[in-house]
Image: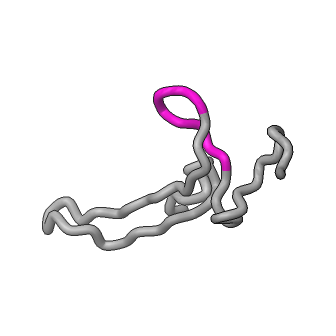
């Protein structure tokens, strides 16, 4: 039996513990989408296991 402080998911080891918007934490992924506002369609989608969104921004 894992310890209460263990922070690894045995069912999905690629997921990470992330802060929930309403408070608390969940074992999660972070999803991002890019949308063409004129055509109103999703043109790209990505799911990562990093809580920070800053690495997902396009850099020009």
Q: Which residues are magenta?
A: 17-24
Q: Residue at x 57, y 52 (%)?
A: 28
5 relative position to 18: left or right: right
What residue is rendered at 28% in x and 63% in y?
A: 35
**25 lies left or right of 8:** left
Viewer-proximal residue among 17 and 11: 11
- Percent x, y of residue 29: 55, 57
Give 51 or 14, whichever is nearer the viewer: 14
Main secondary structure found in the magenta portion: loop
Q: State the residue lying farthest toward the left.
A: 39
Above or below 15: residue 21: above
Residue 7 seen in render: yes
Colour mode of the rendering: one colour
Give the residue at the far front of this rendering: 1
Specify whether residue 60 is in view.
no
- Which percent across, then down, holds residue 59? 54, 62
Q: Which quadrant holds residue 26?
A: top right
Q: Position of residue 19 (x, y in %)?
A: 59, 37
The outermost residue toward the bottom is 43
Q: Residue 23: x and y, percent?
A: 54, 27
Residue placed farthest to the top in the image? Answer: 23
Residue 37's image quarter?
bottom left
Residue 44 lies, with reference to residue 52, above or below; the image says: below
Q: Does residue 43 belong to the magenta stretch?
A: no
* Above or below, 60 relative to 53: below
State how many labels appear: 0
The residue depicted at 62 percent of the width and 44 percent of the height is 18
**Closest to the observer, 12 or 51:** 12
Q: Is 20 situated left or right of 36 in this image? A: right
């Amino acid at each position: 039996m894992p310890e209460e402080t263990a922070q690894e998911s045995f069912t999905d080891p690629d997921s990470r513990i992330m802060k929930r918007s309403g408070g608390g934490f969940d074992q999660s992924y972070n999803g991002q989408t890019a949308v063409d506002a004129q055509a109103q369609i999703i043109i790209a989608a990505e799911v990562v296991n990093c809580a920070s969104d800053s690495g997902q921004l396009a850099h020009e």
